[in-house]
Amino acid sequence: MASKLEWRRKMIISGPRIEFREYMYSKRERYAKLAPEEEIEKEIIDEISEKERGEEPPKDSTAIYRAKSEFRRLIFSNAWAYKNNRNKRIPPLFLTLTFTDNIVDIKKANREFSKFIQRFNDFLFKSKKMQLKHVTVPQFQERGAVHYHCVFFNMPYIEKKVYTTIRKIWNRGKFIKLEKVYTAQGIFNYLSRYMMKDFLDGRLFSKKRYFSSRSLLRPLILRDDIAIEILMRQIIPQYTTLKHEGVYPSDYCGNIEFKNFELKFNVRLEDLELSPYVRKQLEDLVSNQKTIAL
């Protein structure tokens, strides 16, 4: 496997979504374009330090595009990723929660929502340990009150009086809405619409645009050339549909070729027969990210 400074290709695997990127220049060559050889190490240290400091980029179009891309990958990584006790994949569900009271204080609303998530988890899993997987986007209604758009990825089946049960656990408003989900793209389209509105809402400045469970699956970033080549030859042609492709220029990276694929029939890579080498590379990535095993 090439070092982090030498790689030119990578795959970002988010559930059934596979993004392929091929760069004109390696990372070392990119650093060399900007700084002499002796400054490369300093550039790397500075980059890591900035990331560790958690400094946010300005809220420009590039930052918004990056946020949407990360949000999409999070959705695709978790939709239909979890199984019930019969080994069947659990379909995600949408839930909309509103307050009867005109609560306009986002901090107060978020505290009430956090309490609901804990109570809902305790009811569903009969445990204080947080097992419920969700992504939630807050939004202000026209009257100014806060409400929440949630998607639950592993919500067990509630046998009786679903709406009555959820209303009782929520206990802050009578209006709730529960909907089935049919595609990961549908989840992204629905939630990102509200998230993009939040970027323009001054009341959410410096606040979280969305909440998510801490233990959600994250996209796998594969940089091993051999594994990428095997996937491009054996898996991509047979099991995926090409969604987008093209080349875009970058002063820093040179031309970047991109191809976005989606696995057919809503399957995931772990459902397919992979070569031992590819499976080992993916298992290592999964282990490092502390996500579910392949």
Image (cartoon, rainbow, N blue to C red):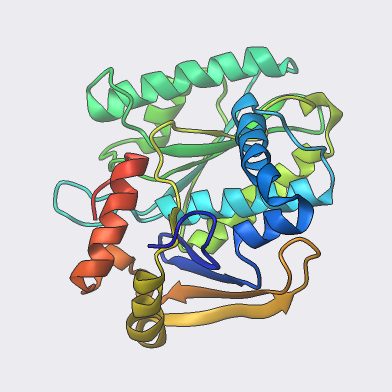
Hey, which quadrant is residue 39 in on the image? top right
Q: Is residue 203 above or below residue 45?
A: above
**Residue extending farthest left:** 86
Q: Is residue 271 above or below residue 213?
A: below
Horizontal placement of 149 versus 238: left or right? Answer: right
Residue situated in front as seen by the camera: 152 or 35:
35
Picture coordinates of residue 27, whole percent (x, y): 61, 58
Picture coordinates of residue 195, whole percent (x, y): 70, 43
Q: Residue at x 41, y 50 (%)?
A: 78
Residue 264 visible in this rendered orientation of the protein: no
Q: Quadrant of the N terminus?
A: bottom left
Residue 6 visible in this rendered orientation of the protein: yes
Q: Is residue 15 above or below residue 163?
A: below
Q: Residue at x 75, y 18 (%)?
A: 104
Residue situated in front as seen by the camera: 125 or 223:
223
Picture coordinates of residue 276, whole percent (x, y): 19, 69
**Residue extending farthest front:** 38
Picture coordinates of residue 123, whole percent (x, y): 29, 24
Residue situated in front as seen by the camera: 237 or 126:
237
Horizontal placement of 207 versus 91: left or right? Answer: right
Q: Residue at x 34, y 78 (%)?
A: 230
Q: Quadrant of the C terminus?
A: bottom left
